[in-house]
Amino acid sequence: MQRMACSFPDEVLEHVFSFVQCDNDRNAISTVCKSWYKIERWSRRRVFVGNCYAISPGMVIRRFPELRSIELKGKPHFADFNLVPDGWGGYVAPWISAMAAAYPWLEEIRLKRMVITDENLELIAKSFKNFKVLVLSSCEGFSTEGLAAVAANCRNLRELDLRESEVEDLSGHWLSHFPDDYTSLVSLNIACLGCEVSFSALERLVGRCPNLRTLRLNRAVPLDKLANLLRRAPQLVELGTGAYSSELRPDVFSNLSGAFSGCKELKSLSGFWDVVPGYLPAVYPICCRLTTLNLSYATIQSPDLIKLVGQCQNLQRLWVLDYIEDAGLDAVAASCKGLRELRVFPSDPFGPEPNVLLTEQGLVSVSEGCPKLQSVLYFCRQMSNAALMTIARNRPNMTRFRLCIIEPGTPDYLTLQPLDVGFGAIVEHCKDLQRLSLSGLLTDRVFEYIGTYAKKLEMLSVAFAGESDLGLHHVLSGCENLRKLEIRDCPFGDKALLANAAKLETMRSLWMSSCSVTFGACKLLGQKMPRLNVEVIDERGPPDSRPERCPIEKLYIYRTVAGPRFDMPGFVWTIDEDSAMRLS
Amino acid sequence: MEIGSEKEKMGFEETELRLGLPGNGGSEGEVARKRGFSETKATTMDLKLKLSSKDAGMDLNEKAKTLKKEKNLLTADTAKHHAKAQVVGWPPVRSFRKNMLAVQKGSSEESDMNKASGNIAAFVKVSMDGAPYLRKVDLKTYQSYKELSVALGKMFSSFTIGMKDFMNESKLMDVLNSSDYVPTYEDKVGDWMLVGDVPWEMFVDSCNRLRIMKGKEAIGLAPRAMGKCMRNRS
């Protein structure tokens, strides 16, 4: 077999490998033999680094000298909910510096939850002559000045996507920095920007880029300007409107409606801030072509929502506020037979009482009426085991199930029992479940079910659940494919963590906050597991100034081949083999 | 599945902490995964850290306390309590989304703003002179200047912050002349003011960002109330 492999010239193997794009497959190819490893590493063009601290930039560059595309993720997921203090880390600077020197032909950078500065953006703009794609998802640390540098210098830029990043808005003029002869824009997402961009610059940019497919505007773009933009880009496939409100005027309405009708390729709509319901019918002509509809910022009531979604027979993805209510979800179940993904967000998450008629029934309806439904994110205030069991039986094809019952510790409202058996039914019936988020009143039993049945589970989020270390032990010992585990406010302590230390090396990361893990256990883990970084995040001061039994605030453990990091702030402590407490 | 037998399998004993390490042979993560977890348990290195019986006793008491506390949290009566004491990061709604909804609510319904604003987050950046990084706080999670002062103190724990009574002129001058830190804020019109001069609710509504300055540098700023006081005097 080995002789046969060597009989092919490298170019032939490289050509064969070029048809294999999936990361896991390329990783597998590289382990076959030394010569395949060599050929594969020279021909790899794209790399995904799920944790920027799991490996150093130098190691990536040494192994893959010819990369064109890199994707990096930084902070843990719970950073989205302000559980990770500012300054924790996730700085992209060392990566950009290293790649600027090593990859002059780099084309794509995709970052998630990382800190990127204007200097970093300027370096990108100067260093990569053929730079094409910049996606900054939930990033922060930069301003519109950095964007101006990218606009001015990246002559081959195709995609600039700032989804949900925090940008310091210094001026809207950055958009004017795209040169007059720049025409290659394919995708622009500036929905997160607060300030007004220069509208005339935007219009001219849109007008001169014939390949523009995706345009997500920010709230500051007024509705009465939207029609003109659409007429300049009738080839748009994805559109995010700006503010969707204006005085109700027939001429503005008909202009808008005509402009929408002219967009024959439009499949995805989002935006809809400050919605005036009277203008919604302007999109009716294109509803039948829509596959994605994001109304999660649209504060419109159920009847208007029903009229809209009722016309979207080809909808595959729907994001909406709980204003849709059970009645609206019944309409979705009846009309949107191709629905694959549903997300229902709370309109009033902090109110003590329900403000809308949305219950578990809405989700049950959709699970019955939509045979392709596989991904759910649902915020509600009541749930029952019966409903969960029905959903599980209806939809064994579910792959992502995230339920957030707003009040922590809420039991089954019919029986006042914990929701263990309901979630147990989900993991038992949905054999391909990859992602699960739990909520409500839950004992250790639910974790027993998860450990027993959730064999394909890769990511689990747990909050205010469980009774003892046994719960955590069930998950760590039973879920064979677990990669990411995030836990908050659960009575899990040292025992399960230490008994399953080996498991942690097979996962990307573990987050535990407001649990019962002691500093002693963290020290033990850090000393004995050199390929894990055990980070204790505690803003009360040095952990050894408190008794070793005192629970730490937050714990983040991740596997790494790069050793301890050197950019930790004062409130992060890590413990290494020297068994000395390391500060930054 | 018996919960009892699970406990036995885990070697659940109060006085020992056992460490489940990968086996001696292949310690590659890949190999451990292939072998499955029953095998890694079999080759576990037992590191018995025997705690004294006294500690074990305390352990159990603390554990009982934590469990009891959790149970209390889980009763229906105290469930309502959660609504008032806003838990950080719960429900898990991202700041961008929270702020977007807040802004839309505020602009569309003036009359409901007082009611709505009680529930909306108010994230502001906090910088401290000399500290290498910014923090963010949600002012809605505090009910008074004292609570904010305690929280800021924790965040920048190596520095001391004075949140003194700014209505007292002599005390104020003491603070401003010392090298203690003084919290200041930028209000909605861009002026920098000393924290503490207006009622708490008004402060929360008008504060754009916080900056914790050295007392000496803050001398140029004067609280609105002091300004009035000084004008009245002359």
Image (spheres, coloured by chain):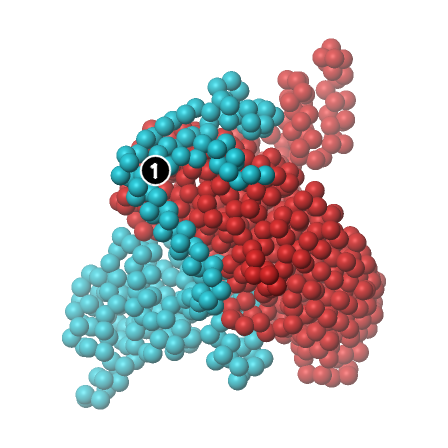
Chain colours: A red, B cyan
Determine whether, in the image, residue A278 is placed left or right of residue A516.
right
Q: Reply above or below: A387 against A434.
A: below
- State the quadrant of the N terminus of chain A: top right
Of A402 and B81, the residue lying toward us: B81
- In the figure, is residue A184 to the left or right of B91? right
Look at mark 1 in the image and give the residue it sits on: A520
Quarter of the image for residue B55 reads: top left
Q: Is residue B117 above or below residue B91?
A: below
**Left or right position of A133 against A396:** left
**What is the tally of numbered marks visible in this picture?**
1
Q: Residue at x 59, y 55 (%)?
A: A419
Residue A387: x, y in percent?
Answer: 68, 58
Task: Give how far across and how far down residue B213 sits, in percent.
Answer: 29, 63
In percent of width and height, residue B59 lies at 33, 42
Q: Picture quarter containing residue A452? A: top right
Vertically, is B78 above or below B68? below
State whether residue A519 appears in this view.
yes
Question: For the point 38% across and 78% down, which residue is it?
Answer: B202
Between B230 and A158, the one lying in front of the other is B230
Q: Residue at x 33, y 47 (%)?
A: B61
- Judged left or right of residue B60, residue A206 is right
Residue sitting at 41 percent across and 30 percent down?
Answer: B18
Amino acid at dot 1: Gly
Q: Residue furthest top?
A: A3
Mark 1 neighbour density, 10 Å: few (under 14) some (14–19) many (20 or more): some
Q: Where's residue A487, x and y in %?
A: 49, 48
Report the quarter where the C terminus of chain A lies. Answer: top left
**Secondary structure type for disc 1:** helix
Residue A162 in sight in this render: no
Chain letter behind tag 1: A
